[in-house]
Image: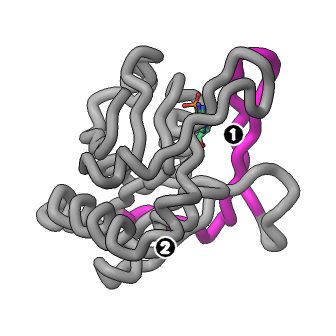
Amino acid sequence: MDSVKKLIRDIPDFPKKGIIFKDITPILADPTAMAEITGAFEKQFEDLKATRIAGIEARGFVFGSVLAYAMKLPFTPVRKPGKLPYKTVRTIYQLEYGEGTLEMHTDGVGRNDRVIIIDDLLATGGTAGAAVKLIEGQGAKVLALGFVVELEFLGGRKQLGKNKIVSLVTY
Ligand code: AMP
């Protein structure tokens, strides 16, 4: 994944002072890197007998949709509040300052679904942990989580219990 790591751009003080934002848009512009990422996820997840991929808004939609297509699985969007048009379930979680909310359609997952959650980046784990709760709250099983990038020094894995976690590029 060295070639993928080289594409990730550090943007200091975005969206606020003190944050180094990992800009993955150069990856999206590189079909070889996208194929490498999708292939690596597929290899890690192929034996899990997953029935569905869930992607977290917004960059998780991109990597999650491509993986769902490659694995021939349905895709479920997990979104920020007020965006989904049909009936929704929601979960509220703690951010560094204040609260965040994630929503999913009530038919986003079924009780028999075995789900892999995809996002671009694992930082503190609050967002991915909330997605796990939302999906498990609907009676589905979370099998694993996949991230293109993990900021290991933030210890986000602790929020994600015993689930299998795959991260392709680490800092
Ligand atoms: P967290 O809930 O702290 O694990 O944050 C993860 C979510 O916030 C992911 O959806 C990321 O896209 C985004 N995020 C958090 N920190 C960064 C960062 N340094 N660079 C880019 N995205 C980030």
Q: Is residue 16 magenta?
A: no
Between 81 and 109, the one nearer to me in the picture? 81
Q: CB of residue at label 2: within 8 Å of ligand 1?
A: no
Q: Position of residue 49 (x, y in %)?
A: 20, 67
Q: Is residue 150 above or below residue 7?
A: above
**Sequence order check, earlier mark of 2 and 1:** 2
In the image, what residue occupies the spot 29% across and 45% down?
168
Tag of residue 65: 2
The quadrant holding residue 66 is bottom left
How far apart in space, not on screen, are marks 2 and 1 (Cα)?
Answer: 22 Å
| Local SS, label 2 | helix
Tag of residue 91: 1
The quarter of the image holding the C terminus is top left
Q: Residue flagged by tag 1: what amino acid is it?
A: Thr
Q: Is residue 97 magenta?
A: yes
Crowd rating for badge 1 (residues with CA inside 10 Å; few <14, some 14–19, many 20+): some
In the displayed structure, does residue 41 sit left or right of residue 153? left
Between 113 and 85, the one nearer to me in the picture? 85
In the image, what residue occupies the spot 12% across and 64% down?
47
Crowd rating for badge 2 (residues with CA inside 10 Å; few <14, some 14–19, many 20+): many
Q: Position of residue 56 (x, y in %)?
A: 58, 54
Q: Is residue 94 above or below residue 134?
A: above
* Range of residues picked out in magenta: 88-113
In the displayed structure, does residue 131 sit left or right of residue 154? right
| Local SS, label 1 | strand
Q: Position of residue 17 (x, y in %)?
A: 78, 18
The quadrant holding residue 44 is bottom left
Q: Residue flagged by tag 2: what amino acid is it?
A: Ser
Total number of numbered labels? 2
